[in-house]
Amino acid sequence: MASETTTLAAGRARGAATGRKGPGSRGRLGLTLFTAVLAAGAFFPVLWMISAALKPRDQVNDGKLIPDDVTLQNFVYVFTEVPFARYLWNSFFVSAVITLVALLLHSMAAYALARLRFPGRETVFTLIFSTLLITAPVVLIPLFLVARELGLLDSYAGLIIPAIFNAFGIFLLRQFYLGIPRELEEAAIVDGCGHWRVYWSIVLPLSRPILSALAIFFFLANWNAFLWPLVATNNPDLTVVQLAITTFQTQYTSAWNYILAAALVAAAPMLVLFFAFQRQIVESIKTSGLK
Amino acid sequence: MTSVVTPRRTSPEAAGGTPPEKKGLSRRHREWIAAGLFLAPDAIGLLVFVAVPMLLSVVLSFFQVSGFGSYEFIGLGNYERMLGDPLFWDSMQITGVYVLVLVPVLFAVSLGLGLLVKQKLPGMGIFRTLFFLPYVISLVVVGLLWKFMLDEQVGVVNKALRGLGLDGTSWLGDPAVALYSIIAVFIWVMMGYYMIIFLAGLQEIPKEFYEAARIDGAGPWKQFRTITWPLLRPTSFFVLLMSTVAAITGGFELVFVLTEGGPANSTSLAIFYIYQQAFIFGEYGYAAAMGTFLVLVMVVCSAVIFKVTKGGRFDDGE
C-alpha cells in the first residue's frame, strides 16, 4: 500500500510541477530496510548452519559467523565414517520412483475424472477428494499393520508404494485438465485416436508445466519425509538420509561440526532444487491455495 | 508397479484405429471401460493405503494387539484406558496449547509478511526468497540446526543474549519454555509458505478498490479493515483451516529431534505420545484408539472453523 501511496504522492507532486521528493520516499526506504533486516534474520539460521559445517572441531562453538579457518574435513568425515552416500542414494531412489509413478497414475486418474464420461463420475471424485482429509500421521498405525501384512516392511517397495497415493495431485491435475480446451482432443478422437493415445500424446505434453511443478513438490516432500521411513524400516541398507542424520546426531552428540555437515548435505539437494525451480514451486503453492 | 503398464495393453482403443462405428462395444461403453482402467491404479491404491487404514484405525481401537499378529477384541477397553490415562490428557493439553498458540501467531506473521512482500520495493524478489527458503528444508534438518542454535551453553541465541547483557535461558531444557521454542521454530519453517498463499490472495484484490478508498481519504489501517480483511476472507479461511488441521497432528519431527517429548513431558504432543505407545511399547490397539480420538477432535475443530467463518464467504454480515 505504501508503494501505491508513493505513486499517488509522486503524481500529485508532478501535478503541482514541483521537483521535490514526495513524502513517501523516506518511508519507502525505511520499509525496504525493515524488510531487509527481517529477511536477513530469516536467512541467518541457514547461514549459521553452513558456517558451522565449514568450521574445524575446535572452532564450531566460537560464535563467529565467518569461520577463522574453513575446512571441508567435516564432509569427508561424514562420508567416510558412515555410508552417507548410500543414504543419499536411498532417498534419491525412493523419492524419484514415487514422483514418477505418482505423476503417471495421478494424471491418468485426473484425465478420466476431467474428460471421460461414465456413470458415477461425481461420486468417485467426491470419494477421492474426501481422502484429502486423512492426514498421514493419523493412519500411521493401521498403515504400518497393513504394510506388515503385505510383507512391505523393510523393503524399497514398502518405502515407495504407500507414499504414492495422494489425492492432492489428482485434484490439482483434474483442475488443470478442466481448464485446457477440448478441441485438440476432439479432433484426435474424430481421427480415430483411442483414449490412451489422446492422453499420452496430447494431454500429457500439454500438461508439462503443471507436471513439472508437481514433480518438484512430490520429490521435495518425499526427500524430506521422516515418519514413515522411521517406522517402516530397520535395515541399515534402507536408511534414508533424514533418518540417518538423526541417528548420526545421537552418535556424535555435540560434535556439531559433523552433525551440521551431515544436515547440510541432506538439505543441499532441496536448496539447489529450490533455487533452480523457485518460480514453479511458488506458482504451484498459489494454485493449490486458491483454486 | 506392473499395474502401471496394464491399461496400455488392455485398453481397447490402443489396439488400433477403430473408428467410432459399432464394433462389438458401443463408443459409450468403451469410454466407461477406458475410464475404469485409467482410474483403477490410483483408486485401488487410495483404497488400500488411505481409506482402508482409516477404517482399520477405528476397528483396531476395539482390539488389543499383542506382539506379532494376535488380536483380541476388548470392546471399549482401550477407550476406558484412555479416559483414565493422565499422560494422554497431559499430551492433549499440550497439543491444545500448541495449536492455540501456533495457529494465531503463524496466521499473523504470515499475513504480515504477505502484506510486506506485496509492496513494490527494490530487492523484493530476494526478500521473498529468503522468507520462503526455510520451507524447503526438512524438519529433521531444521530440528538439528535449531538444537545447535538454542543450546544453553554453546548456542548462538544465548551467546547473543549474553552479549547484550541478558541471561538467556534453557530454551529446550526448561519445561515452561520448551514448547514455545518448538512453536517458534515451526513458525520460522512455515511462515514463508503461508506468506505465499496470503500474497496470492492479496494480489487478487482489485487495485481500483484501494484507489477509490484513497480518494475518499482512507488511511492504510482503514483500507486494511474495509478492503483487505473482508476480501481476503477465503484465503484467511483456507490458511486457518489448513494450519489448524496440520497443527493437531503435526510437530512430530521437531519434538523427536529437539526434545524427545521432554523435559518433564512438557513437549509430549498427542501425536508423539501415540507414536511412543505404538512403536516403542507395541500398544497398537491403544494407540489406534487415541489416534481415532484425535481424528474426532480434528473433525470437530474443522467444523467449528467452518461454522464460525461461514466457510470463508464474503457476506460476513458486517
Image (cartoon, helix red, strand yellow):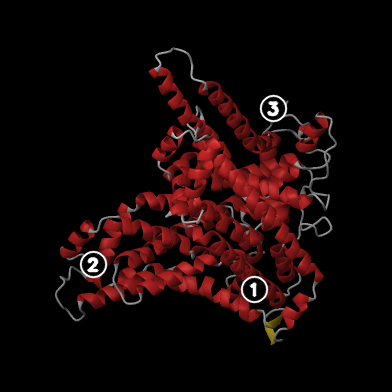
Q: Position of residue B250 (x, y in %)?
A: 64, 59
Residue B216 drawn at (x, y percent): 45, 35
Mark 3, secondary structure of its residue: loop
Q: Are marks 1 and 2 on the same chain?
A: no
Residue at image point 29% right, 75% down: B32
Asked whether the residues under the numbered discs 2 and 3 touch, taking CB atoms below 8 Å apart as contact, a structural biologist would say no
> Is disc 3 surrounded by few (<14), some (14 to 19) or many (20+) residues within 10 Å?
some
Q: Earlier in the sequence, mark 2 or mark 3?
A: 3
Question: Which of the two residues, B229 or B239, is positioned nearer the viewer here?
Answer: B229
Mark pair 2, 3: CA separation: 62 Å
Label 1: chain letter: B
Quadrant in which the N terminus of chain B appears: bottom left
Please name the residue shown 51% across and 65% down the image.
A132
- Asked if residue B137 can be seen in this view, the reply is no
Kindly identify the residue that appears in the image at 74 percent across and 40 percent down.
B149
The residue that mark 3 highlights is: A66
State left or right for residue B227 relative to residue A135.
left
List the residue tagged with mark 2.
A194
What's the CA distance linking mark 1 and mark 3? 50 Å
> Residue A87: x percent and y percent?
61, 53
For residue A8, what is the image quadrant?
A: top left
Quarter-of-image position of residue B262 = bottom right
Give amino acid for label 3.
Ile
Secondary structure category for the residue under label 2: loop
Residue B218 placement (x, y as % from top left): 50, 35
The secondary element bearing badge 1 is classed as helix
Residue B316, above or below B117: below
Q: Are marks 2 and 3 on the same chain?
A: yes
Which residue was labeled with disc 1?
B292
- Viewer-proximal residue among A47 and A6: A6
